[in-house]
Amino acid sequence: MASFRLTQVASHLNGTKAPRTQIGVQSPDDIVIVQALRTPITRARKGGFKDTTSEYLLGTILRGLLERTRIDPTLVDDICVGNVCPPGGGATTARMAALYAGFPNTTSVQTVNRQCSSGLQAVVHIAHAIQAGMIDVGIGAGVESMTQFYGPQNKLIPDTISDEVMEAPQAADCIIPMGLTSENVSAEFGIPRPKQDAFAALSHQRAARAQKLGHFNEEIYPVRTKIADKDGKETEIIVDRDDGVRPEATAESLGKLRAAFSADGATTAGNASQVSDGAAAVLLMKRSRAKELGLPIQGKFVASAVAGVPPRIMGVGPAYAVPAVLKKTGLTVAQLDIIELNEAFASQAVYCVETLGLDINKVNPKGGAIAFGHPLGCTGARQISTLLTELKRQDRRVGCTTMCIGGGFGMAAIFESEH
Amino acid sequence: MFPCKYRTAGFKGYAVKFSPFTDRLLASAASANFGLIGNGRLSILATTTTNTNNSRTQSNTNNSPLTILPQQHYDTQDGLFDLSWNELHENQLISASGDGSIQLWDITLKTHPVAKWKEHKREVMSVEWNYTAKTAFLSSSWDGSVKLWNPVHAQGSVQTFSEHTGCVYTAAWSPRHQDQFASCGEDKSIRLWSTNAPQGRSIASFGGHTDQVVSLDWNKYSPDMFVTSSTDRTIKIWDTRNLRGSVTMFGPFEFPVRRVKFCPFSPHFIATAGYDMSASVWDVRNGSVTFVHDAHTEFVFGIDWSYFHPGQIASCGWDEQIHVFNAPLPQ
């Protein structure tokens, strides 16, 4: 008798600790997203932003976020910007963009580079800083002008790498061109070319349909910018839609394209993500703070995870990162309502969909990077705006964003819509 | 206001309740040896106010220092874990005992209980008198059942509700529907019941806590809302109309809250007593702690709000102390 009572009291003190963030449960300390917003995405060198600089794109989307949320800029403590290619990691231009957008110099700015996941990592850094109490209100953003900083004339990898480092296991795999990692995935896991082309066509069809029905209207902030014609004459334009989408693309038409990275390969320009320009930004704070400030809540950040994978098949990243984040939350794949899986290449996207057992109807319902582009640092933040607006439109709750990452990683995050 | 104290020497406090009839009485249920083994003691205490002239006054006001004096106490064979005042008879109250029995006491009598019911097969963890219909009371037990009783019903309990697996820590009456009550237990679940339901089946079941649910209380002003505390170290707010799960969650904290009670004067505040040795008041609108009483030096297990003085709270704990103090109730 006494021993039972003693065990009971002891069980109260050794009890399991509830997860801090729970699906369907609101907690004052939840990290919430007031608004996730993005610019349109345009084709590098040819599209609407071909004469627009990355700091202008970033400054414009930050300005857009202030405009839409009407938050007092002085309340924002820190802005973390994901970008991959610019010199100096884009740190100075990011600071200038924030000042241009109307933030006071008391709002700090930082940049982060985890390659293709930089935009998501930026959002996660801000979420963690708020959770830890380092800051109160923050913005996680992402930007990339691949027109400016991505191409044969831009060095992302130095000319001379130490021989000793190069000889370390898998180190040389880190400088394999991304297209070749796609070929490695195709070959090693047997993803046939027709399947890849079909997936690519599906991305275009879905994006075209979403554009036609106005499903991107809520997440896109139109950008006023200048564009120069071949004579250098500048005109002012407003860019309000993704210009990479090809409604007429079919598996057959894509099947005619030549392999781009290896002679008998399966990866083409048509079943790979487009090289693009764009920016996105996400405003985050604790639920209690949002309530105090009278701000609406678009969604909640639940959890994130990163997983390392062999660099030569970096495309498999999501197949490891998604289970990792599901384990943290106790959710199963079936409980995810929508998955934003970045389409770096159809090969790795198909591999991940099949390996994770995802319902293809839940994956990228508005299309993906194959259709409208993958501005490297922007994508991670962009996916959040696409995800939350679509969860609301479909009246569903739980979503996951995920991507593969050059260098051999995957990253994934879980969000809950609070429409 | 200086917290007024009384020591139930030799007995560790498990529950304390103000009388619903007068602001001058409160009672405490306490057990020897931390409730693990040994006797129980029901203490009837009188509160008086002494003004600066040191003379007794008629009624207790919030600003005067309170004195707690022992009026009566009753010892029981096994430990006592809860008590509840009779809503119809101002001199009567019931106690919940570790040997599975429930006693009905009349405080005008010196020693023995007026009635004793032994039906539960294990420790009785809570008792609560129905404060709307006033004729019946509930008991919940480690034997997994909740029982409905009416003192005039001589044969014993009126009905038994057995759907929980494991210890049922608390059963609490709905403030609006006099036939409805909720229970919570070791099986991490919360159940809503009606005494009118056929075959004693529960109306609804709520899940979401990841560990034992130890306390439950209803919002007296928004009767669809109830609050629970759990050993998963959270407090959750529920709406009976939302079967998907809790509406809001506070925590997780470092230590679980052992008892939670909604304020009778406001829809916004709960009082909590916990393993962190504090008695606190929370605003349920935002989960902020508005008042902390940290004078206890051991686990605080019992807490109750005064029905006469808004913000006045009594707490008791394993430090053998009963404290009465005032917490502000900001708008």
Image: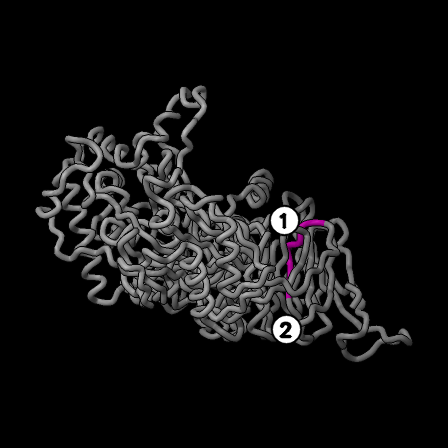
Tell me the mark number nearer the camera, choosing from 2 and 1: 2
Question: Label 2: how many residues lie within 10 Å, few (<14), some (14-19) or many (20+)?
Answer: many
Amino acid under disc 1: Asp
Residue B98 falls inside the magenta stretch: no
**What label sits on residue B20 in the rendered view?**
2
Q: Give the colour scheme shown.
A: one colour
* SS category of the residue bearing label 1: loop
Mark 2 or 1, nearer chain start = 2
In percent of width and height, residue A52 lies at 37, 58
Q: Residue furthest front?
A: A231
* SS category of the residue bearing label 2: loop
Which of the 4 image quarters holds residue A301?
Answer: bottom left
Say left or right for B199 vs A351.
right
Q: Nearer the viewer, residue B155 or A127?
A: A127
Which residue carries the number 1 mark? Answer: B78
Q: Is residue B276 above or below residue A394?
A: above
Say left or right for B275 vs A72.
right
In percent of width and height, residue A99 lies at 53, 61
Q: Is residue A165 above or below residue A346?
A: above
Are callouts 2 and 1 both on one chain? yes
Which of the 4 image quarters holds residue A311?
Answer: top left
Amino acid under disc 2: Pro
**Magenta residues, start to end:** B298-304
